[in-house]
Amino acid sequence: MKHDPELIAETSAWLAKADQDLRMASLAADTQPPMYGQAAYHAQQATEKTLKGFLTWHEVVFGKTHNLFALGRACTDIDPQLCDMMIHASRLTDYVWKYRYPGDPADPTEQEARAAIALSKEIVTAIQSRLPSETHP
């Protein structure tokens, strides 16, 4: 089945940005000294952009939001098998603002940052498996 080239391009653009964020999350966690706050932030961003890519592919309008619970709910409307994963994904929502500015809470622990990265990787893999390969980065 031939897909709309514009839809492929738009979906692919979201997934490419998500891939960059996921790579940046790993780099931030592995640099010396580690930047676990940045790692958590980029894990959240990778997840958010992946969900937006999935919604884009299915032509669901999502507006400007960083709320992974809302995005996840829209994804489960399309594919109910994603429900459990989207519940876990929603835990990453606060990383979009936490640890980003002076006076914010102390950085997450290494364990917390690496768990965020692992969860994001799991979500990216699951979502990409549900999309045509020509949309993958």
Image (spheres, rainbow, N blue to C red):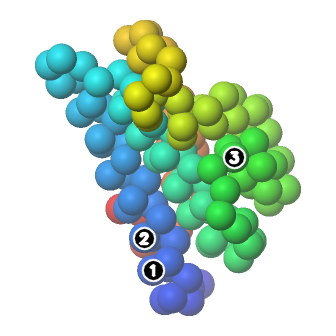
Residue in the image at 45% along x and 14% along y:
106
Three-letter amino acid code at disc 2?
Ala
Quadrant position of the C terminus in the picture: bottom left
Disc 1 from disc 3: Cα separation: 24 Å
Residue in the image at 43% along x and 53% along y:
18
What numbered label is drawn on residue 53?
none
Choose top left, top right, bottom left or bottom right for residue 58.
bottom right
Q: Nearer the viewer, residue 68 or 131?
A: 68
Apparent side of residue 30 relative to residue 8 in the rendered image (left or right)? left
Apparent side of residue 24 relative to residue 60 in the rendered image (left or right)? left
Element marked by disc 3: loop
Apparent side of residue 59 relative to residue 52 in the rendered image (left or right)? right
- Mark 1 and mark 3 lie on one chain; the one further toward the N terminus is 1
- Mark 2 and mark 3 lie on one chain; the one further toward the N terminus is 2
- Residue farthest to the left, as pictured: 32
Q: Where does residue 12 sit, x and y in percent of width and height?
A: 44, 70
Q: Nearer the viewer, mark 1 or mark 3?
A: 3
Mark 2 packing: few (<14 Cα in 10 Å), some, or many (20+)? some
What numbered label is drawn on residue 13?
2
Decide: is 89 above or below 80.
above
Element marked by disc 1: helix
How many numbered discs, if any? Answer: 3
Q: Nearer the viewer, residue 123 or 89?
A: 89
For mark 3, what is the residue? 67
Disc 2 from disc 1: Cα separation: 6 Å
Element marked by disc 2: helix
For mark 1, what is the residue? 9
Residue in the image at 70% along x and 68% along y:
63
Circles 2, 1 touching at the beta carbon (< 8 Å): yes
Choose top left, top right, bottom left or bottom right for residue 110.
top left
